[in-house]
Amino acid sequence: MDQAAMNSGLLLNLISYFALLSLISFGGVSASLPEIHRYFVEQQHWMGSEEFARLFGIANAAPGPNMMVVGVLGYQVAGPAGAILSFVAMALPSSILAYYLGGIWQRFRDRPWRIATQAGLAPLTIGLLLASGYVLTLTADHGSWVAYAISGCTVLLFMATRIHPLWCLGAGALLGVFGWV
């Protein structure tokens, strides 16, 4: 198989995966990270867990939406075309669906089934976000019990207080500078 055919197959794979994921995701890209990790690392073997965690960190360090990780992953797998097409495939289907369903959803705003559905989606989204954090902790902490303890304490701190995340980021940086992590 020639290089052009392989690249087009790879791009089609990325487009179809992210387009489908776009339609079934609740809570955005961050809530879909365990599935994206499973697909990129365990199923396709396009990268290892550590590289996935690094790319996630790079995507979140840049200003912009949290779905930038999709473009970064697409770039890593298939270059600039992979970045653009992955990003569009993740954004476009759900945007079109939200546009058309938004009006219908608004029309039924006082219906009991809509209120119950919306109330049920909140814990689902929180659970998916916690699962994302769990996957990233496993990939980034490299088995160090100190790193796991810091991650666990950070989660508990965020759940119990309203502390700004930059304080925890700064504390983690200091621990890294002194070689404690």
Image (tube, helix red, strand yellow):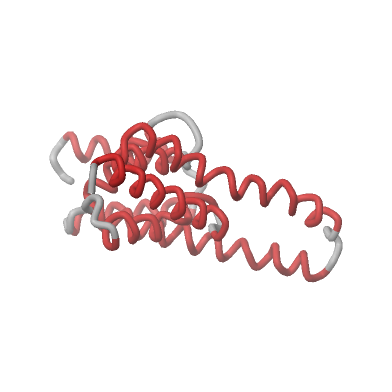
- Position of 2 with respect to 60 (left or right) is left
The image quadrant that residue 172 belongs to is top left
Considering every residue shown, the one lying at the far front of the view is: 1
Considering every residue shown, the one lying at the far left of the view is: 179
Residue 115, image x and y in percent?
77, 65
Identify the residue shown where x is 36% and y is 38%: 72
Residue 167, image x and y in percent?
39, 37
Q: Is residue 121 above or below residue 69?
A: below
Q: Is residue 51 above or below residue 25?
A: above
The image quadrant that residue 178 belongs to is top left
Q: Is residue 138 above or below residue 14?
A: below
Identify the residue shown where x is 45% and y is 39%: 85
Residue 2, image x and y in percent?
23, 44
Residue 1 or residue 143, whichever sits in front: 1
Residue 102 or residue 132, whichever sits in front: 102
Residue 97 or residue 152, whichever sits in front: 97
Identify the residue shown where x is 78% and y is 56%: 105
- Position of 93 with respect to 88 (left or right) is right
Q: How many marks?
A: 0
Q: Is residue 60 visible?
A: no
Identify the residue shown where x is 52% and y is 60%: 126
Residue 30, image x and y in percent?
46, 50
Q: Is residue 123 visible?
A: yes
Considering every residue shown, the one lying at the far top of the view is: 63
